[in-house]
Amino acid sequence: MTTKFGRRAFLAGVAASTLPMPAIAQAAPVRIGLLTVKTGSLAEGGIQMEQGILTFLKQKNNTLAGRKVEFISADTGGSPAGAKTKAQELIERDKVDVILGPLAAFELLAISDYIAQQKTPMLSLAAAEDLTQRKPNPYFIRASATSAQAMQPLADYAAKEMKVKTAVLIAEDFAFGYEQMGGFHRVFEDDGGKVLKKIWVPLGTADNTPFIAQIGQCDVVCQGYAGSAPVKFMKQYADLGLKTPVIGGETAGDDALMKSFGDDAVGMINACPYTLDLANDANKRFVADFTKDYGNVPGFYAAGLYVNGQVVEAGLQKVNGDTSNKEAFVKQLRGVQLTDTPRGPVKFDDHGNVIGNIYIRRIEKQNGKLANKTVKTYENVSQFWTYDEKTFLSQPVYSRDYPPLKL
Amino acid sequence: MKRVGWAVALIVLAAVPLWVGGSFYVNIVSQILIAAIFALGLDILVGYAGLISLGHAGLFGIAAYTVAILLEHGFGHSVAIIAALGMTLATTMLFAVLALRTTGIGFIMITLALGQLLWGLGYRWIDLTHGDNGVSGTSRPMPFNISLDSADHFYYATLLIFVAVLIGMAILTGSAFGASLRGTRDQPRRMTALGFDVWTIRFIACVMSGLCSAVAGILFFYYNEFISPHALALSASAEVLLMVIAGGSGTLLGPVAGAALVVIMKSVMSAYIERWNFTLGAIFVLIVLFMPEGLVPGSRRLVRFLLAAAKTGRGAAPARSGG
Amino acid sequence: MSLWLVLTVNSIAFGGLLFLLSAGFSLIFGLMRIPNLTHGSFFMLGAYFGASFVIWGSAPFWLAAIIGAVLVALLGGLLERFVLRRLAGQNEAQVLVTLGVSFMIADLCLMEWSGDPISVEAPSPLQGVARFGGLIFPTYRIAIILLALIVAVALWALIDGTRLGAMIRAGVDDPQMARICGIRVSTLFTVVFCLGAGLAGFAGMIGSPILSIYPGLDSDMLPLALVVVILGGTGSLLGSLLGSFVVGFLYNFGQALLPELAYFVLFLPMVLILVMRPQGLFGRRAP
């Protein structure tokens, strides 16, 4: 069950729950805005995003770097126009110091120019590659991953550890799908594998069977479904009696989906910047508090926002709580380096994108329930994988036809 | 009385940047006006021609995309805007020819299908439209060398266009053409018997409706400086239809009221009411139960009722019309 | 070879599911001329109710599906009796209210069941695959085909063989005359609306092992139901049946073979048929 928070209700609740303030002059509160989606088909990830950041703020007693936090959550409705309106609301009406979110790449693209104009730092999970590559935005920071960042190591794992030679790729027909599969495609072929086919499924397809039926013979199937679609896909895949192993990206095996999967998902290998079973202090505390408050385990979206909170706190500490100089604030944010986060160590490259660990996990059944078990960790993974940055950027962005199939 | 009402409204609207409380709210009013232009255009068909369309977002979208793509390829604003109007008109005429072969539910379904075709194009023709990533714009036009970048300036430009559209609607619906259009809605067979070319009348109505949608689409693109296939989805067509019906179809102010209702709920109230979608749905249901003809006609009815009750309450005053 | 077979089986199965969904819409629209845009919500709600009984009530699959359908039928009846009945003939108001109710139901479902997709297992004897002469068939999909045919036959028997059916047919052909003949058209309307809603709810649960249940299911299914009913012709059961299979085939084959034109493949034929024959394949010209 989601916790119901109206904006006013949240602020009132927070006021009631904080410890009494020491009697020294308090600086003005730092305002953090969240752009998320709480209605419609993206709601699942969006609600988790809010839960993740709320868990963080609660642990910090709503105070970061000595300043009280005023948190404002805005529902964009999952549309670009909605994202623009809510971004304007947060910046012009609520005068936030930093924005977390939005969720979807198309929302991010709609507001990117506006955010840069308004010089408001923004930390988003949206995976659109070019925003930290060929069309960089100096006010944008991404602590999660680009679309391909986890897929590139996955391809390496598939080629070198699973020792598979041929792959068929299947993903939804939009930018996130193209970019994921593009990353996998390039690294897999550079490691000696061969991609036989790329199947694109229209967004929102209820029944994937006609597309799964085209997969044909191969050593491994790589899927890039997002949201709730991986659940349908695995079920429909099993219904067709297919036995080829399936591997996927960060959204395909999200820990939060484990309770929705059927037994058909057992054995799926997936790569994610976050993993529930990471045994460090930050993650233990995060998972314990999250599960207590919300009754579910956190997944990639919740963890991503929690880490964003940590980055904001670190940035605030570096500027001594002074957010009035926006250029300085964003520079410090981009210079943050953390070691104890739910996803492990975090630092940023020159484009504002994270360099961190990518965890390869396998879905297993433990005590009658499904869970991910980490089988390999790739450390210090950047958005460019092992390629030279300049070469990488000189090539076109991953798209439907790039890299092209070698027939 | 009526003229005073209009004048007051105009003054209030013109002064919006002064009293509404910040650029965020000025932008909200701009959004309401853009939605109102779109809804007014749809109302020509729904309210006056009696043809319900579920594909209008496609026409809106084609205008926006044309501007976006031409700007991206280096053309100037004037060229882009004229091309957008032309493109939308051509598409509207094609749609009208196909859809006017039937009326009623057939018309609804064909327009739905045509809208979906355009939406599919927006998603699939990636080389042209970038698919779901959409197309960004970087500048707004500068009529008479006045910049439209600020919220206030853009608002005034939008307001001028809105007033022009409203006046155009008033003239259209008050004219002989407007009367014959309503005739084709109420009594198509009689109109044919009387010698009117019902098909052509409806066709012209479609074209006018498409033109309004084009204007709204162009403004929408310049406002957001972004367009993506979301704006052409079935839900967008349904939303503008709801604005028209909830506000009161077949009236001049109905679509405007409906636009205000939906935009305010979505963009402003959603900050205060978590379940704003539910609330909006409930409002629609209540409107249907208590004011099925729409907010504007229903409110008029309510005001008349209250005035009449006040009059009879004061004793046997002779009933007077007008005032 | 096996790709064609898989696609064919899937087309027929999906068509069967669509028939269960759209038969109700066709009846409601054919009889009462109400464009019931809440129909997708009924489908989704039936699925959520049924899934709740299975997962939290440990009820057997078929029983849960029937109880879910009954609950949705009741809800439909309330909607018809207290809201839609006052709006006879007012298409716009009907569109507004049915869409409004669908918003409300969608948000309520989100509140109650959250945004996470719910997975329902097919009943155990029907899971997995069946093998016939070297070919593999997903068992549950075959079951759906059979179920759809049984329901189709049952509905046909109802409409053509019973007094209720005769009254429905009379009401579809000419409501005024039906009233004059003493048929209690108002009660009939409520009964048919309940039946239509219940069928949709039942379809939702039946489809859930394939589609799963998630926010947005209602708006994914509604356009398909509309396409079926328009293609097949409103008020005609045979039309709905054939329309469902046509759409099932278009959806599966079109999307698989021509993914570039995925949306075109579904809607272009619809436009062409509507342009050439506006009443659909089996419908009657509106009076």
Image: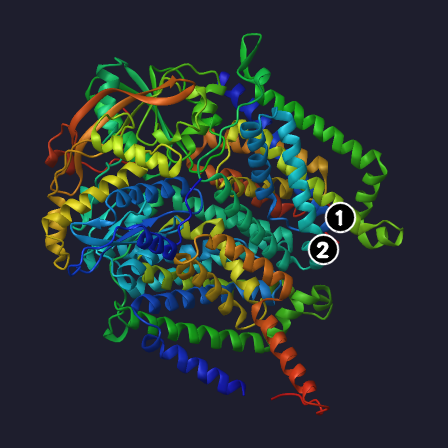
User: Position of C184 compared to A209: left or right?
Assistant: right
Q: Secondary structure at mark 1?
A: helix
User: Position of A210 compared to A35: left or right?
Assistant: right
Residue A262, x across and y down, in percent: 45, 23
Q: Nearer the viewer, residue B13 or B195?
A: B13
Residue A75, x across and y down, in percent: 38, 51
CB-based contact (under 8 Å), mark 2 and mark 1: yes
Specify whether residue C246 is in view.
Answer: no
Identify the residue position indicated by label 1 in the image.
C189
Q: Residues within 10 Å of mark 2 (few under 14, many from 20)?
A: some
Marked residue nearer the N-terminal end (2 or 1): 2
Q: Amino acid at mark 1?
A: Phe
Q: Which mark is residue A242?
A: none
Q: Quadrant of the N terminus of chain A?
A: top left
Protein chain holding label 2: C
Residue A389, x across and y down, in percent: 12, 35
Q: Nearer the viewer, residue A144 or A179?
A: A144
Identify the residue position indicated by label 2 in the image.
C85
C-alpha span from label 2 to label 1: 9 Å
Q: Residues within 10 Å of mark 1 (few under 14, many from 20)?
A: many
Residue C230, x across and y down, in percent: 63, 44
Judged from this view, the residue extending furthest toward the right is: C181
Q: Nearer the viewer, residue B187 or B74?
A: B187
User: Position of A61 compared to A380: left or right?
Assistant: right
Protein chain holding label 1: C
Q: Amino acid at mark 2?
A: Arg
Q: Secondary structure at mark 2?
A: helix
